[in-house]
Image (cartoon, rainbow, N blue to C red):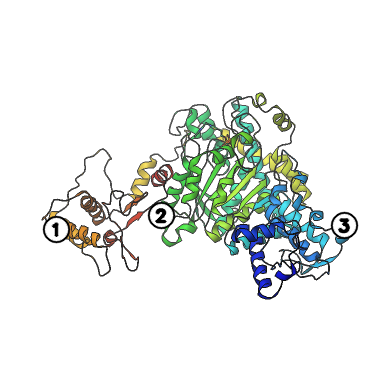
């Protein structure tokens, strides 16, 4: 449809133009009649088939002229800009992230130059660079297409469209678009990467050889988790982190314990042999025990790694890790968020399915629960027990629940070492720079059944035929590193030999020795370090507090400073004063206040958390008073010591887990 000429004059034209630009950005932003009108128009020359709502805001679109600058006379620049924009938005849908499945080009037509009217004859024409990082100001269309394809549709599929802050989105764009032109892996890193992959593979081989058929929830198919974790720790440490609190489930846990947390292999072997002793942890306990260790990164920085014990209940450990990290952060003071980094490792089915995942993500930016950003790794082996993704979630990616946070989500092919290293660097730098969560969706597979006794071909015969004939991630990655010129075939063989020898020696060396205790009495160690209470929890404790002192404290707490206070609050506080003086019986709220006050006065800290914690669900607490004129908050108990009270999201499971942590 054409617009009548009478409409296209003077103020009318300018007004319509503004409405049109607004509709292009968001169809819901204009009145219904304009929406219907614009929908009925032919797409203008620069629209290029882009759907409303998907247009970048940078060049102003016009309803009349076809919009963008016409440097090439035929709108080539505009068409190229649209192609770039589509790659930033939809590139991940065509990226080669799945080692088991080739990508399906037809599924994403917007990524084809032809879709935007860019034909073979245009490829050698020069256009101005429409803001793509890593390219010069003037570039041929061919070079530009190659570059954006490498950046956005290679082994990394990056979702940034939900990142709402412009500066953050631009930062991720810059990182992703410069991957093709920067050195992601140097030789020492490549060598270490392969060594960690070899360690991961050899560990499983050793356990399988010694304990054939035993349940070990092997990491095989997803061994890349080990070098990925190491790279994340290394990069965060280079940016000031020193402590890492890790949470993970069964899959690859033993492997990560040995190859990331440096737990002696011998101890794991003992656990398989059900050797009782100080190393305790036989039977299934070995998949639930925690561990901590000190290590030094490849760049020589000291780090402390802690794996949190967890129950079988998938993802239940997530809030505990967050709470534990937050507690450690408090001890580091102002530096805390930077120093302590939580890392959560999820299964793809559990991440999409368990409600606590959404609860924990929702805690991530809340005042009382923030931990300065969690590194989430989804070990995406594309199956949950025997259930395929199509039956396990209603969304394309298992990570889609995390889109609500507006943080980058990196899907990455676990068999491309450069891509994994690039994602590790981007994710860790994002966390350290913006102090927000980030998601890595590590595409891999599961070599065996859910555990080693399960037969996966009952339910996924074709998938497992494919898997059986595959080279291991170590072999594939070694080939890639040789192809990049970073390692030679001989290097790869040597690295594997060294890895196997070291692990075998570790498994046997202390065969005669007493199993070592990790922490003879972990609870006591922690209590001595961090608690002022020295008695047993079974002791009865004298909770008495001197009467006149208590009265003094309560009078102090209930003497309001200057301000505009709600008349009903004034009355409550007045009554509390009368109670403090003994003129009224103590009510529940005041008794609570007295309990917190005496703890604080004795040097303990108090933290209350949950919905309505500050006011109290039954209007009884009034721990925070709000000035009715300024909305300034006043927390009387803070006068006495570290008293924190936080209203939380409406969650019980995650908030309780957080406080437990
Ligand atoms: C809350 C909960 N539900 C069910 C189980 C039983 N279970 C253990 S592992 C598993 C499959 C997990 O799949 P995924 O998250 O993809 O991890 P994978 O085992 O594939 O690594 C199930 C259903 C459990 N442990 N916890």
Q: Nearer the viewer, residue 141 or 175?
A: 141
Q: Nearer the viewer, residue 433 or 505?
A: 433
- 640 w.r.t. 392: above or below: below
Earlier in the chain: of badge 2 and badge 3, it is 3
Q: Residue at x 64, y 66 (%)?
A: 19
Label 2 residue SS: loop
Q: Nearer the viewer, mark 2 or mark 1?
A: 1
Look at the image and tell me in which quarter the C terminus lies: top left
Q: Residue at x 57, y 36 (%)?
A: 251
Query: Ligand 1 closer than 8 Å to the CB at disc 3?
Result: no
User: Could you tell me how far apart the alpha carbons at marks 1 and 3 are, in whole angstroms?
Assistant: 87 Å
Q: Mark 3 points at which residue?
A: 120
Q: Mark 2 points at which residue?
A: 368
Q: Determine crowd level at label 3: few under 14, some 14-19, many 20+ residues with C-alpha closer than 10 A.
A: few
Q: In this view, does 350 lie to the left or right of 576?
A: right
User: Could you tell me how far apart the alpha carbons at marks 2 and 1 are, in whole angstroms?
Assistant: 33 Å
Q: Which residue is drawn at 56% across and 40% down?
A: 352
Q: Position of residue 268 (x, y in %)?
A: 53, 33
Point out the quarter of the image occupied by ligand 1. top right
Earlier in the chain: of badge 2 and badge 1, it is 2
Q: Residue at x 76, y 53 (%)?
A: 111
Q: Position of residue 277 (x, y in %)?
A: 43, 30
Query: Ligand 1 closer than 8 Å to the CB at disc 2?
Result: no
């Amino acid at each position: 449809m054409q617009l009548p000429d009478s409409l296209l004059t003077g103020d009318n034209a300018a007004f319509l133009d503004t409405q049109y630009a607004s509709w292009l950005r968001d169809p819901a932003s204009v009145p219904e009649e304009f929406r219907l009108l614009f929908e009925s128009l032919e797409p203008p020359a620069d629209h290029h088939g882009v759907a409303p709502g998907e247009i970048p805001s940078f060049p102003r679109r016009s309803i009349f002229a076809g919009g963008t600058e016409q440097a090439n006379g035929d709108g080539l620049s505009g068409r190229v800009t649209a192609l770039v924009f589509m790659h930033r938005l939809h590139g991940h849908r065509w990226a080669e992230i799945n080692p088991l499945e080739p990508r399906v080009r037809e599924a994403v037509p917007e990524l084809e130059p032809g879709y935007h009217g860019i034909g073979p004859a245009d490829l050698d024409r020069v256009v101005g660079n429409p803001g793509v990082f890593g390219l010069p100001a003037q570039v041929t269309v061919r070079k530009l297409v190659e570059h954006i394809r490498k950046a956005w549709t290679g082994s990394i599929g990056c979702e940034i469209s939900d990142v709402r802050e412009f500066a953050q989105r631009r930062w991720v764009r810059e990182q992703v678009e410069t991957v093709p032109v920067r050195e992601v892996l140097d030789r020492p890193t490549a060598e270490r990467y392969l060594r960690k992959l070899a360690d991961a593979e050899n560990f499983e081989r050793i356990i399988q050889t010694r304990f054939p058929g035993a349940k070990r929830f092997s990491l095989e198919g997803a061994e890349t988790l080990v070098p990925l974790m190491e790279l994340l720790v290394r990069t965060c440490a280079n940016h000031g982190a020193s402590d890492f609190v890790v949470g993970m489930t069964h899959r690859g846990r033993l492997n990560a314990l040995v190859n990331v947390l440096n737990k002696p292999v011998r101890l794991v072997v003992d656990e398989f042999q059900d050797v009782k002793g100080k190393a305790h942890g036989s039977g299934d306990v070995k998949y639930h025990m925690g561990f901590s260790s000190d290590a030094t990164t490849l760049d020589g920085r000291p780090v402390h790694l802690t794996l949190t014990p967890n129950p079988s209940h998938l993802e239940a450990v997530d809030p505990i890790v967050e709470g534990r990290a937050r507690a450690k952060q408090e001890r580091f003071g102002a530096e805390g968020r930077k120093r302590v980094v939580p890392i959560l490792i999820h299964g793809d089915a559990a991440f999409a399915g368990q409600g606590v995942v959404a609860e924990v993500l929702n805690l991530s930016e809340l005042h009382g629960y923030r931990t300065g950003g969690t590194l989430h790794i989804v070990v995406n082996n594309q199956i949950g027990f025997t259930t395929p993704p199509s039956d396990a979630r209603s969304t394309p990616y298992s990570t889609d629940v995390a889109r609500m946070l507006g943080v980058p989500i990196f899907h990455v092919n676990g068999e491309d070492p450069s891509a994994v290293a690039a994602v590790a660097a981007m994710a860790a730098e994002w966390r350290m720079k913006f102090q927000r969560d980030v998601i890595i969706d590590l595409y891999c597979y599961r070599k065996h059944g859910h555990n080693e006794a399960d037969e996966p071909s009952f339910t996924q015969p074709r998938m497992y035929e494919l898997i059986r004939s595959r080279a291991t991630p170590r072999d594939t990655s070694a080939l890639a590193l040789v192809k990049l010129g970073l390692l030679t075939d001989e290097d790869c063989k040597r690295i594997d030999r060294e890895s196997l020898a070291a692990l075998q020696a570790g498994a046997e060396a202390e065969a005669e020795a007493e199993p070592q205790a990790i922490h003879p009495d972990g609870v006591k160690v922690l209590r001595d370090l961090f608690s002022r209470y020295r008695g047993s929890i079974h002791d009865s404790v004298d909770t008495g507090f001197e009467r006149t002192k208590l009265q003094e404290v309560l009078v102090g707490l209930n003497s309001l400073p200057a301000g505009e206070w709600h008349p009903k609050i004034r009355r409550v506080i007045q009554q509390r004063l009368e109670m403090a003086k003994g003129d009224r019986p103590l009510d529940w709220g005041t008794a609570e206040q007295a309990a917190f006050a005496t703890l604080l006065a004795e040097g303990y800290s108090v933290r209350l958390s949950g919905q309505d914690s500050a006011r109290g669900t039954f209007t009884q607490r009034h721990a925070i008073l709000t000035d009715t004129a300024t909305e300034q908050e006043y927390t009387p108990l803070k006068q006495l010591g570290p008293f924190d009270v936080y209203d939380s999201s409406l969650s019980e499971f995650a908030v309780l887990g957080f406080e437990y942590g």
